[in-house]
Image (cartoon, grey):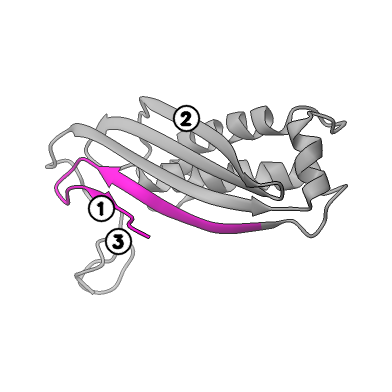
Amino acid sequence: MSELSHFDERGASRMVDVSAKAETLREARASGLVRMASATGALIRDRALSKGDVLETARLAGIMAAKRTGDLIPLCHPLPITGATLDFAWDADDLLRIEATVRVFGRTGVEMEALTAVSVAALTVYDMCKAVDRVMSIERIRLEEKSGGRSGAFRRID
């Protein structure tokens, strides 16, 4: 099991010791989709839902989640995030794309923080819209790219 860094040679869980790693600028970008009825998308775009501005609430929820990832994922290091942004785009009338970019100057990467930001932002959209659209789906949450650190850069090509 030595190739999995969150397990020791006996298979016991452990938090990876990053104290010997160099501090570098690290960045990760993740994305996800929320599929919904076209009418729900129109309500969001028109800011016509009674609960308020869905995208701004989701943006704040995603940023807050990125900052709290170490509290949510058992073996993630709590990180002093230096930047977190969430962007929204409509790929179709019924398909909202969420992208999060997270940065840190530290000893470990922020992939989990970016993925958590997207996930919580998507859940927030669902929560705010479920009264009008219970068949919404959250889809394809994934890492798009990351940079910094010993393992180097990664960029999804599909």
Three-letter residue code for mark 2: Thr
Residue 125 in the image: state x and y as whole percent: 70, 42
Q: Earlier in the sequence, mark 3 or mark 1?
A: 3
Question: How many neighbours does mark 1 have within 10 angstroms: few (below 14), some (14-19), or many (20 or more)?
Answer: some
Q: Is residue 111 left or right of residue 130?
A: left
Q: Are marks 3 and 1 in contact (CB under 8 Å)?
A: yes
Residue 14 counted in the magenta span: no
Q: Badge 2 is on which residue?
A: 85
- Residue 10 appears in view: yes
Q: Is residue 95 left or right of residue 25?
A: right
Residue 20 figure quarter:
top left
Q: Is residue 111 left or right of residue 42?
A: left
Residue 151 counted in the magenta span: yes
Q: Which mark is residue 16?
A: 1
Q: Earlier in the sequence, mark 3 or mark 2?
A: 3
- Residue 76 appears in view: no
Q: Badge 3 is on which residue?
A: 6
Residue range corresponding to the magenta coloring = 138-158
State the separation of the CA atoms marked 3 and 1: 6 Å
Three-letter residue code for mark 1: Val
Q: Residue at x 44, y 29 (%)?
A: 84
Q: Nearer the viewer, residue 57 or 18?
A: 57
Q: Residue at x 75, y 45 (%)?
A: 127
State the separation of the CA atoms marked 2 and 1: 27 Å
Instruction: For marks 2 and 1, give the one nearer the viewer.
Output: 2
* Image: 40 above or below 137: above
Residue 35 in the image: state x and y as whole percent: 68, 54
* Image: 144 above or below 148: below
Q: Residue at x 20, y 45 (%)?
A: 18
* Image: 7 above or below 106: below
Per the image, label 2 sits on a secondary structure element best described as strand
